[in-house]
Image: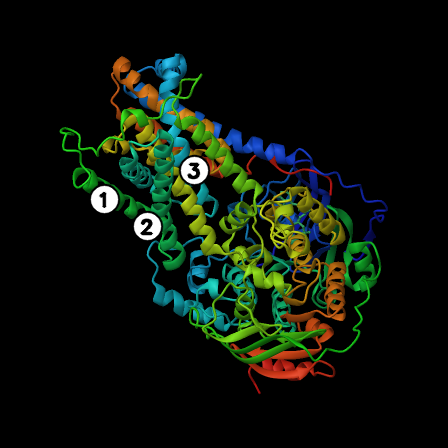
Amino acid sequence: MTTAIGVEAVGIGKHFGSFHALSDVSLKVRPGSVHGLLGENGAGKSTLVKCLLGYYRTDEGQFIVDGREASIERPADADALGLGMVYQHFTLVPSMTVAENLVMSRQNVPNIVNWRSEIAGLKRFMETMPFKVPLEVQVGSLAAGERQKTEIVKQLYLQRRFLVLDEPTSVLTPPEATEMLGLVRDLAHSGALTIVIITHKLKEVAAFVDEVTVLRRGRMAGSGSVRDLGPADLTAMMIGEPHAPKNPERQGIPSAEARLVVSGLRTAPDAGRKGLSIGSIEVHAREIVGIAGVSGNGQKDLVEVLGGQRPAESGSVTVDGAPYRASRTESLAHDVRVLPEEPLRNGCVPSMTVVDNLNLRGFDVGPGKSHRSWLDRAGMAARARNMIAAYGIRTPSPSAPIGVLSGGNVQRCVLARELDGDVRLLIVANPCFGLDVKAVAETRTRIMAARNAGTAVLLISEDLDEILELADRIVVMHEGQVVHEMPAKGADPQEIGRHMLGQH
Amino acid sequence: MSTTTLAPAVSNPPARVADVWYPLRRSAEAVLVPLAALAGAVGLFSVFLLALGQSPLDFLDLVWRGAFGSWFSVQNTVQRASPLLLTALCVAIPGQLGLVIIGGEAAIVLGGLAATVAALPLIHTAPVIVWAAMAIAGSAMGAFWIGLSGWLRAKLNVNEVIASLVLSYIGLALFNHFVEGVLRDPASLNKPSTYGIGDQNMLDTVPWLDVHPGMPAGIAACIVCWVLIYRTGFGFASRVTGGNIRAAQLQGLPVTKLILTACAIGGGCAGLAGAIEVAAEYGRANASLNAGYGYTGILIAFLARFNPLAVMPMAILLGGLGAAGGLLQRRMGLPDATIQVLQGLIFVSILASDTLYGRFRWFQPRGTA
Ligand SMILES: Nc1ncnc2c1ncn2[C@@H]1O[C@H](COP(=O)(O)OP(=O)(O)OP(=O)(O)O)[C@@H](O)[C@H]1O
Ligand SMILES: [Mg+2]
């Protein structure tokens, strides 16, 4: 059993060029506590913990680890001190299995690995874990939620004494999140480990966090004990206003016109997991169909098929009655937009600029959907400026590579691009992944506004609350199949949860 | 810790100042990093020379004189740089899509051969007709040959490095087979060659400047390719595909078509280089075409980080090194392969310099957000 250590940051400053990501930030984390690090998108939360973990060099200030001043120059230093982190972006090697990833992440890997005994050991270790991850499956084929769990399991496996979780629950279902957070809180309170959680979810803060520090625009906006702070205080510290904007209002009823029809869709099994086998899903105009399910039950495959990233073995997808294969012509003709999960990996070109990435939909489209062969660079820059303003994207420069933006800001970029203009069919996976409270409300309002204006929306989300709030109809997926369908009004979360787990 | 501290609310967030100089600094980074890599390679090479008991300063002096010291050496440099401009594009254009095509050597020799074959029935018509036929045949042949690698990649998912390498061997073998077989001019005794296209059909040097006629063609091709990549939808789509294929698929970009087009354009450039070499230098297709331009083109494309405009100075540089080779051999008694050692060192340090990008703060985006 490890013992928890405390960490203190004093007067931390960090800048990228003349852009100050952090100025004079101080933080005190008691050993054995769960500390929340809060703040809006781009506030500098990830930057602060990356400094602590040796991923970035700080420009000012120092860290005190376990009562001693620590010079953390590189990740190995942090590692030696027992500091660990689950990053917002995944760090597992996709082409290796879960077991290989776990074993290889250890400091003392023997030159010749006895896999049989390692796997036996891992299985015993996994017994003690609150959630299971398949050991012998390639990480690349895991869905985001499963990968997130694997990342956490990996850190526990490495016996950290201080663990940072950067938005760990974004892709977990609420029961999973509760379970996971309960587990880490108990670990912390038992004195085995100190936890810092970066999160945008105030409910989690209220239930699992002892103390918080709030950042705003790279500076301290406040700190204190959660017992003394109400949600309004926290929201005020985070976004400068006591209340997040109201939830969006649903107007009008779904039309009879089926815009997206998926029928008899099958895909090949992939890396030991079943392929899709969907009887039928229909999405009507002015309707949001929410797909609920534990992550890894085929939602990712479905989005990939609809987005043209995965071939279907059989079955048909039609939009407005016409066959749809996700070519550029078809998606333009029917105004189909897709917001995939993990937008940086699936929907952006990290090395290209923010302007370029915001124009991936429209760079070859002229007035009246005509084809454009020459780039309209002035027009692209103007459109990007509008989106940056409308979606509050924080970027050092429109011509910065999109890869340097904070997680929430990448998400905003993809949202801006996919929601811009007329949309007739919108396919969104976890649209609020990584967004701050204000942006979550804005995004849900935008999706609802699109629906009210007649867009057909297929919402794939691992956040059941989000589905219950937005959807007109709920479809539950389990092991690649549609196992249940019901109107969202009056739906019982308990019942949905049972279907999600395959208990019908 | 039970006290609650609340910092004063930020009343007026600072206005956002866009970092207007960032694109310029980014270009500066793209120029300075390869230059630093070059300097590093020259440093390593100096150590190598010292070990051989030679003076690096003498070496640099000779390279300068051999490459640019006199009008004659400049002409020599340009003559070598001209085909390099085009063979580098054969790597740089598919490179936009993330493909590494190393089969340019076959495209240049087969392009030269096809151009000669196209010219032979026309030699008694007008030279302009002959040149047009040669240019078309040469580029079409090159486009086809590199296009094959692209097709294997796009349709059958064969690694394009392997495909283009193997196709390169096959292409060279085919070339030898034809030149030494059915197409051979029996009069060519020592060096098997095809029939000649006739002196009246040879390309002259560029008027006024008196340099290799491939120079204007190569420069024009570089500029056209730069425009294609950075100013057209095709180029944008190619860069998206090269940057992240999943994003390209999500946007419904026709990845197969893009790959085939880019490979055909690149191969067309290399094939054109072969046609120009035949029309300007040899007058017939023979083993002289197989001079390693295709391989040096790979080095240039990497030095230029696949930017067609940057290909121009890099081609001059490598052309100059080649031109100085003879002088070095005579004056310093260095073996011919010395230049290849230097080229190898440059290649390795260019690849290693990739890790320098993003390391220097000065080049990074700034601004108060
Ligand atoms: N390598 C970098 N180069 C330039 N700017 C950067 C870099 N990394 C981060 N930034 C900038 O620093 C700011 C803070 O980013 P950070 O990732 O810490 O935000 P965050 O609080 O974690 O936000 P989110 O909730 O969206 O994850 C952002 O505006 C981002 O653009
Ligand atoms: Mg972050």
Q: What is the CA distance from the residue labelled 1 to the residue labelled 2?
A: 16 Å
Tell me the chain of label 1: B
Specify the amino acid type for callout 3: Leu
Q: Are marks 3 and 2 in contact (CB under 8 Å)?
A: no
Residue A109 visible: yes
Residue denoted by label 3: B89
Q: Are marks 1 and 2 in contact (CB under 8 Å)?
A: no
**Residue B25 percent coordinates (x, y):** 61, 32
Instruction: Name the quarter where the C terminus of chain B is drawn.
Output: top right
Query: With respect to residue B254, does B45 lie above or below?
Result: above
Q: How many marks?
A: 3
Q: Which mark is residue B174?
A: 1
For mark 2, give the secondary structure: helix
Q: Which mark is residue B163?
A: 2
Q: Nearer the viewer, mark 3 or mark 1?
A: 1
**Residue A427 percent coordinates (x, y):** 63, 67
Q: Quadrant of residue A446?
A: bottom right
Along the polypeptide, which appears first: circle 3 or circle 1? 3
Along the polypeptide, which appears first: circle 3 or circle 2? 3
Query: With respect to residue A312, does B70 lie above or below?
Result: above
How many neighbours does mark 2 have within 10 angstroms: few (below 14), some (14-19), or many (20 or more)?
many
